[in-house]
Amino acid sequence: MHALSVNRCRSVSVNQSSSRNREFRPALDAIAAALGLTLREAMVGTPEQIERSLREAKEAGAAGINVLSSALLFALRGQIIKLAAELGLPAIYQWPETADEGGLIAYGPSLRGAFRQVTTVVDKILRGAKPGDIPVEQPTRFSLVINLKTASTLGLTVPPLALLRADRAIE
């Protein structure tokens, strides 16, 4: 078993499906540099590109992958989770529900919560509010979910401090 730790990582692959996430790249680069990591970016738009990018990440020695938030990557999360497990690549996802489906770690706002926010806005519009008068709302609650079963399958030990910080651990 290996400890789930940045100390073991030297290269991390960042998978995304749109340039929308490019705004986050400077922050990712700064954090990576501070931790002595190398980031490898993979732009993907098809299931075949996802498979190729994960296999290339593994061959390049990536110690893990960060699957950024996008409709495409969320829609294809089952393929990503399965292939990451087959390749022995630890992965972090942006929607907590992904950990329930077998992803190792997920950190972000709840998809259900996001849909609740959308329905609240739609309700206001249907009741006569002008869309331009409705303030834009950002998620206010983020959850860290760790899938211990996946960690065990990958031969990883989750540090106790990470478990203490997690909102939920899946056994």
Image (spheres, rainbow, N blue to C red):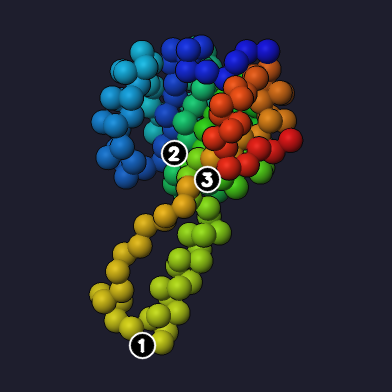
Look at the numbered disc 2 and give the secondary structure of its residue. Answer: loop
Q: Residue furthest bottom?
A: 128
Residue, disc 3: 143
Could you say which disc has been placed on residue 78 in the image?
Answer: none
Marks 1 and 2: which is nearer the front? Answer: 1
Judge from the rendering whether residue 33 lies leftward or rightward of residue 169; answer left or right: left
Q: Quick one: 54 or 132, which is closer to the camera?
A: 132
Q: Residue at x 36, y 87 (%)?
A: 128
Of the residues under marks 1 and 3, which one precedes in the sequence? 1
Q: Residues within 10 Å of mark 3 (few under 14, many from 20)?
A: some
Query: Which residue is drawn at the image coordinates 28% and 25% (left, top)?
Result: 30
Give residue 161's quadrant in the image.
top right
Q: Quadrant of residue 96?
A: top right
Q: CA distance from mark 3 to mark 2?
A: 15 Å
Q: Amino acid at mark 3?
A: Ser
On the image, the x and y values in percent for residue 46 come to: 49, 40
- The amino acid marked with disc number 1 is Gly
Question: Is residue 40 something one can see in this rendering?
Answer: yes
Pointer 1 local density, CA inside 10 Å: few below 14, some 14–19, many at least 20: few
Which tag is nearer the camera, tag 3 or tag 2? 3
Q: Which residue is mark 1?
A: 128
Tag count in the figure? 3
Look at label 2 and name its amino acid.
Answer: Leu
Element carrying mark 3? strand
